């Protein structure tokens, strides 16, 4: 896996964005929504390997071109990681060469601990590549906000902020991936953050 | 006798606003009386006392004790009657008896004058008046007046530590009431009165020793902290998410790497979910890049599987499979790349720089995702990594993006200087520790609840107070964990997450025993 | 039944499953995660047949109700009168299944076990190795059409 890959000859840029978070949090749903909504623009197939129970086995992969920015053709590669605890080795592999991260937290109350553990583990996984999470373009997504109307207990946003964002202070979005709410703004934000972090060298 | 009448007339007409003219008249009317009766030793006490009182009135004037004029008037009348009814040479004993009565009154007045504070009862009445005004009506006027008077007192008594502390408490309470106004807790207002009463007592009782005054002050400080804690608790109960305190304390993510900023978990603006309006019509969407360059052919997934060219996904799958073959413990080398960079290819490690993205990035993405033109970069300040105080205004006009801002907790009891803040925190923590100690000592092990809940509340309070001191918070966490031994978790029953699907409800394990009344219910079906 | 939690990977002795959103799941005793419970193909087939049985016998006047019981996992499907709670049926199923298997072990081949209460019966039919269909019916025996259709000795359409 490569880092932000820039081919100055062909004037192409590839950046890798990983959707990370606890299991069943909505990472794959984000990509599925993006893939369905922008099928015409994306024009590529989404690669998805799932378990019998419809859970990501290895990863989901969705590449697409966003077009030309300042003379460079920009390709975005979206990845998700398997969320279950036992698949950490795979998660670490998927993170190799990551340029930007969307942390998809599950707002359900029972997932509170899992959110925190997942974020802590993300830090450790990046450490194995000598990458500092605090220097990584990152966006927080608090997903499944739609559940508040269905009687399922969810965490208030301020609790999520305190649990997950009090140190990172990253941009954060409430979202509902299943209905598409704030999925695209999240993606746009992480792409913007990632590109702006290399724009000095690029554009 | 004319002098006596004139003197009594002047004394009768005296009021609090004693002037130099009046005191001059008093002296001028007293002088002939004094010279007339000076040769009589038995009358000397009267003359001395009257002379002293007139001198006192002349020196203090409006600041004189209000009873001084009354005592002088009574003394003058008694003296006039005495000299008219008795012979100063012959009735010495009677005169002495009368004199001793007047001496007693004189001495009582002397004591009153001696115990009067430097500022004067009237000044304290000013403070009392503004406090009573707030008690009556909390308005901008009464609050402003209160603030002015308290400031005056603080500057006047900045060297008197006990008085200064009392005044600080009064000021803090006044600030709280001023910030909450109609929503101020009634206990705060009644406590303000109580603090003033205690202050007045120390102020107007010179016989009170310094130690006694200090004890009274410490008691008020303790009550003040208890009130503060009570108000904070009630404030949290009213806010959403307050039940989170009842949950186990979870340290925020990454707090073991860097200390968490003192961000309040309350008062954070919630983001209204901006659902993507799904009104896009497939026919109406103009495909990106149309007219710029021919659209690329759809990717042939099956072809890719058999082609020599590898996609990034293939590379990743290979890596995963290799990991599975050789063992999960094998981790890839750091920054290992399968493709060594060919000519013209540069690799960059993106680093979060918080710089403004160039406009073309936003425009291109908006065009690709068919979004409305996003606001300019200046409207979306990116949070600097090292900035701890942050407030981002929610952009009402931009419905496609929302950023949850941070806000600091509104703390109206914040003292003016950090030393005092630390002192107050220490006092607060000490009080909670004392309470915790007492609760632990008196905990009934046979029936730990509800004492255990109160202990856990104290632990949570201390943890919040010491949130910037990891050793102390870790100790509190250990204490909380050790308490779980007394309060073991109930074996979890199947949670209610399972949807009641066709009457299939989760059955807890212990129900495998015979449920009470089962045969009656079976009989009811089979005999109906 | 030993199953592994899909989330934390720990072993679980599964004695109870829940049906939610149509799927059988068990709750991990270690992490509390609801992992899917996978019946073997034979059991899956029986479960599908049982659904058809419930659907079709819903309107049979002779049938008061029925429920499906798993020897290890307890109550799976419930179509009994509401007066009987799931805990009642779980207890009843456990007793009846035990009685059935005792009779089978003592007497050899057993086709069904019947519990008579007043003038009505509770018929226990075993399906496969682990599943029991327990039917409450008004008559002293299972109506013939139901018996022949759903519980033939060894013919097609049988469970």
Image (cartoon, coloured by chain):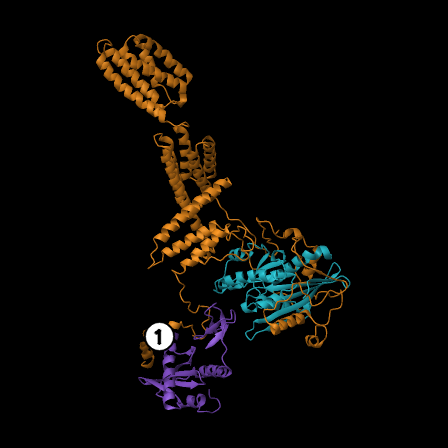
Chain colours: A cyan, B orange, C purple
Q: Closest to the observer: B157 or C14?
A: C14
Count of marks overlaid on the render = 1
Q: Quadrant of residue A69?
A: bottom right
Q: Quadrant of the C terminus of chain B?
A: bottom left
Q: Does A46 sit above or below residue C58?
A: above
Is residue C70 or residue B16 the one in the foreground?
C70
Q: Is residue A20 left or right of residue C145?
A: right
> From the viewer's perspective, is B292 left or right of B431?
right
Q: Is residue B336 above or below residue C99?
A: above
**Pointer 1 residue:** B513
Horizontal and vertical percent position of residue C60: 41, 84
Q: Between residue C12 and residue B175, name the one nearer to us.
A: C12
Query: For the residue carrying disc 1, how many other residues have a C-alpha within 10 Å: few (<14), some (14-19), or many (20+)?
Result: few
Q: Position of residue A106 (x, y in %)?
A: 53, 63
Residue sitting at 22 percent across and 14 percent down? B94
Say which quarter of the image contains residue B490: bottom left
Q: Quadrant of the N terminus of chain B?
A: top left
Q: Position of residue A41 (x, y in %)?
A: 68, 67
Residue in the image at 41% along x and 15% along y: B21
Q: Position of residue B323 (x, y in %)?
A: 62, 71
* Residue B277 visible in the snapshot: no
User: Label 1 marks which chain's residue?
Assistant: B
Q: Residue at x 42, y 47 (%)?
A: B229
Is B346 placed above or below B46 here?
below
Q: Is residue B305 left or right of residue B59?
A: right
Is residue A77 in view?
A: yes
Secondary element at image label 1: loop
Choose between A11 and B347: the one closer to the eye.
B347
The quadrant where residue A14 appears:
bottom right
């Amino acid at each position: 896996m490569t880092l932000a890959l820039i081919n100055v000859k062909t004037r192409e840029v590839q950046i890798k964005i990983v959707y990370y978070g606890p299991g069943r949090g909505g990472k794959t749903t984000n990509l599925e929504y993006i893939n369905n909504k922008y099928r015409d623009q994306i024009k590529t197939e989404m690669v998805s390997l799932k378990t019998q129970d419809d859970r990501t086995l290895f990863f989901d992969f969705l590449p697409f071109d966003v077009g030309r920015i300042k003379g460079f053709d920009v390709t975005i590669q979206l990845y998700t990681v398997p969320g279950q605890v036992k698949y950490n080795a795979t998660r670490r592999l998927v993170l190799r060469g990551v340029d930007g991260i969307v942390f998809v937290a599950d707002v359900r109350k029972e997932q509170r601990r899992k959110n925190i553990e997942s974020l802590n583990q993300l830090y450790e996984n990046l450490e194995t590549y000598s990458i500092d999470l605090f220097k990584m373009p990152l966006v927080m997504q608090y997903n499944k906000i739609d559940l508040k109307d269905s009687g399922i207990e969810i965490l208030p946003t301020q609790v999520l902020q305190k649990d997950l964002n009090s140190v990172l202070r990253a941009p954060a979005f409430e979202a509902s991936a299943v209905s598409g709410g704030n999925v695209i703004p999240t993606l746009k934000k992480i792409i913007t953050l990632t590109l702006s972090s290399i724009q000095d060298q690029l554009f | 006798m004319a002098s006596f009448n004139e003197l009594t007339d002047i004394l009768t007409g005296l009021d609090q606003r004693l002037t130099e003219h009046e005191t001059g008249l008093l002296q001028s009317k007293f002088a002939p009386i004094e010279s007339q009766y000076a040769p009589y030793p038995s009358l000397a006490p009267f003359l001395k006392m009257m002379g002293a009182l007139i001198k006192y009135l002349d020196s203090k004037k409006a600041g004189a004790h209000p009873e001084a004029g009354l005592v002088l008037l009574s003394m003058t009348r008694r003296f006039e009657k005495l000299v008219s009814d008795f012979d100063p040479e012959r009735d010495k004993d009677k005169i002495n008896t009368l004199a001793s009565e007047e001496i007693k009154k004189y001495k009582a007045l002397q004591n009153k004058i001696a115990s009067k504070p430097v500022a004067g009862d009237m000044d304290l009445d000013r403070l009392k008046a503004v406090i009573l005004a707030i008690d009556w009506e909390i308005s901008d006027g009464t609050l402003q007046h209160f603030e002015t008077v308290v400031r005056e007192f603080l500057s006047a008594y900045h060297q008197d530590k006990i008085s200064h502390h009392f005044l600080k408490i009064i000021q803090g309470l006044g600030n709280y009431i001023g910030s909450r106004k109609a929503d101020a807790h009634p206990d705060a207002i009644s406590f303000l009165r109580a603090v003033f009463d205690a202050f007045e007592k120390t102020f107007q009782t010179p016989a009170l020793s310094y130690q006694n005054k200090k004890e009274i002050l410490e008691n008020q400080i303790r009550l003040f902290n208890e009130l503060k804690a009570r108000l904070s608790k009630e404030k949290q109960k009213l806010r959403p998410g307050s039940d989170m305190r009842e949950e186990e304390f979870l340290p925020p993510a990454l707090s073991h790497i860097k200390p968490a900023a003192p961000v309040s978990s309350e008062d954070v603006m919630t983001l209204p979910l901006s659902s993507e309006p799904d009104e896009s019509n497939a026919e109406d969407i103009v495909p990106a890049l149309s007219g710029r360059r021919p659209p690329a052919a759809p990717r042939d997934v099956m072809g890719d599987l058999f082609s020599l060219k590898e996609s990034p996904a293939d590379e990743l799958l290979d890596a995963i499979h290799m990991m599975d073959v050789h063992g999960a413990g094998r981790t890839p080398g750091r920054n290992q790349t399968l493709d060594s960079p060919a000519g013209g290819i540069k690799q960059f490690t993106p680093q979060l720089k918080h710089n403004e993205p160039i406009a073309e990035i936003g425009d291109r993405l908006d065009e690709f995702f068919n979004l409305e033109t996003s606001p300019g970069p200046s409207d979306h300040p990116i949070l600097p990594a090292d900035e701890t105080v942050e407030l981002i205004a929610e952009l009402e006009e931009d419905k496609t993006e929302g950023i949850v801002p941070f806000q600091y907790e509104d703390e109206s009891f914040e003292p003016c200087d950090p030393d005092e803040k630390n002192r107050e925190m220490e006092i607060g923590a000490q009080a909670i520790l004392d309470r915790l100690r007492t609760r632990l000592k008196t905990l009934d092990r046979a029936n730990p609840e509800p004492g255990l809940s109160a202990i856990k509340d104290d632990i949570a309070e201390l943890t919040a107070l010491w949130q910037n001191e990891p050793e102390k918070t870790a100790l509190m966490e250990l204490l909380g964990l050790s308490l779980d031994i007394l309060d073991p978790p109930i074996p979890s029953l199947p949670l209610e997450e399972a949807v009641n699907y066709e009457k299939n409800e989760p059955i807890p394990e212990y129900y495998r025993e015979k449920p009470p009344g089962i045969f009656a219910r079976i009989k009811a079906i089979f005999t109906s | 039944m030993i199953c592994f939690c899909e989330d934390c990977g720990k072993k679980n002795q599964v004695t109870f499953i829940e049906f939610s959103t149509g799927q059988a799941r068990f709750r991990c005793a270690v992490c509390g995660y609801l992992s899917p419970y996978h019946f073997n193909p034979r059991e899956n087939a029986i479960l599908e047949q049982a659904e058809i049985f419930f659907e079709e016998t819903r309107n049979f006047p002779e049938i008061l109700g029925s429920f499906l019981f798993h020897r290890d996992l307890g109550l799976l499907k419930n179509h009994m009168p509401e007066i009987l709670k799931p805990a009642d049926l779980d207890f009843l199923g456990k007793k009846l299944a035990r009685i059935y298997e005792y009779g089978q072990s003592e007497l050899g081949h057993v086709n069904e076990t019947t519990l008579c209460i007043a003038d009505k019966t509770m018929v226990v039919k075993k399906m496969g190795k682990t599943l029991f269909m327990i039917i409450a019916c008004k008559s002293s025996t299972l109506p013939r059409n139901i018996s022949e259709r759903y519980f033939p000795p060894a013919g097609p359409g049988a469970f």
